[in-house]
Image (tube, rainbow, N blue to C red):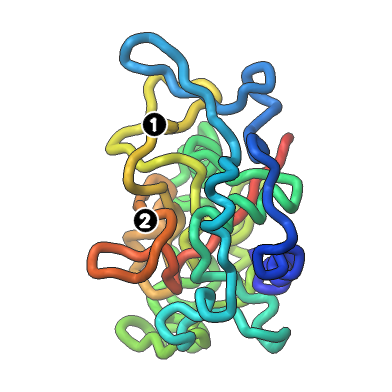
Amino acid sequence: MTVGRFRQFVAAWDGGSGYAPLPGSGKHAHLNGGLGLEEIQADGGTLYESGWNAADDTNIAPTDANLACYGGTFATWTPSPAGQENLPINCVNWFEAFAFCIWDGGFLPSEAEWGYAAAGGGEQREYPWGSTPPGTQNQRAIYGCYYPGGADGGLPSCMGVTNLAAVGTAPAGTGAWGQLDLAGDVFQWIADYYAPTYPNPCTDCAALLPTTYRVVRGGSYNLDSSWLGSSFRAWNVPSGPMTTDGASRIDGLGFRCARTP
């Protein structure tokens, strides 16, 4: 999701006096007879996604200060439109990503959905584009601080927001169904809570039992290629200030939305 598109959501939110999602919205309502994603419990019961919780309205706070994480040096947001509108928005927490997707007519993808797209379904691709290594010229993914200098850059030379690329900069990294930037530039928030293993069995499923963390997928502009694989999983705290044990607002994390097929 770009800075420019996210700016429209911030305007609709209007400092907390405007838009907030309707309770229960944001579910994968086209699945399981409208109940959405499911998780089969150990006792044989079934848990379905709850959608937006009104108590989380206060977790939506995309202010200039909050979107300037780490002092703004690595933040893509600017208080007014500037030259970064086509960069991926970063420094957003999970609730803001979810709320945006609801406002925009979609929902956050489940980990199963994101993984299926990245792996090309049954093709089981190593990377979203296939098995070819990502390279160092920004042709398949923005990672390792190679952008914009290519092989002349590289870790540990990240200088700031200049090392993030506009959405769609690496067209050779396109996934099986046309999705861009499934790997690199910024990680992406996922709907699921983080669990050590995938739910099994899994049909239209997600990890729905609350844990401390939410899943993030996709790798980042400032990390090496080992984070770009279609099967690589990571996590982050969904909301809260920067602390020694985690932060929801980080420069290497943004999001994308999914929609009803």
* Viewer-proximal residue among 116 and 189: 189
Tell how many labels.
2
Name the side, left or right, on which 76 lies relative to 45: right
Quarter containing the N terminus: bottom right
Under mark 1, the amino acid is: Leu
Name the side, left or right, on which 223 lies relative to 66: left
Q: CA distance from mark 1 to mark 2?
A: 16 Å
Provide the secondary structure element on which disc 1 rests. Answer: loop
* Viewer-proximal residue among 257 and 63: 63
Q: Is 125 above or below relative to 65?
A: above
Name the side, left or right, on which 85 lies relative to 165: right
How far across and down, in percent of the image, does residue 7 sit?
71, 71
Residue drawn where x is 23% and y is 69% of the image? 244
Q: Is 164 above or below relative to 29?
A: below
Residue tagged by mark 2?
A: 236
Marks 1, 2: nearer the viewer? 1
Mark 1 neighbour class, 10 Å CA radius: few under 14, some 14 to 19, many 20 or more: some
* Viewer-proximal residue among 252 and 26: 26
Q: Is 238 above or below relative to 199?
A: below
Residue drawn where x is 70% and y is 86% of the image? 80
- In the picture, residue 82 is in which quadrant? bottom right
Residue drawn where x is 68% and y is 88% of the image? 83
How far across and down, in percent of the image, does residue 131 sit?
44, 52
- In the picture, residue 240 is in which quadrant? bottom left
Which numbered dot is residue 91? none
How far across and down, in percent of the image, does residue 126 sit?
42, 48
Under mark 2, the amino acid is: Asn
Name the side, left or right, on which 159 lies relative to 87: left
Q: Upstream in the sequence, badge 1 or badge 2?
A: 1
Residue tagged by mark 1?
A: 209
Quarter containing the C terminus: top right
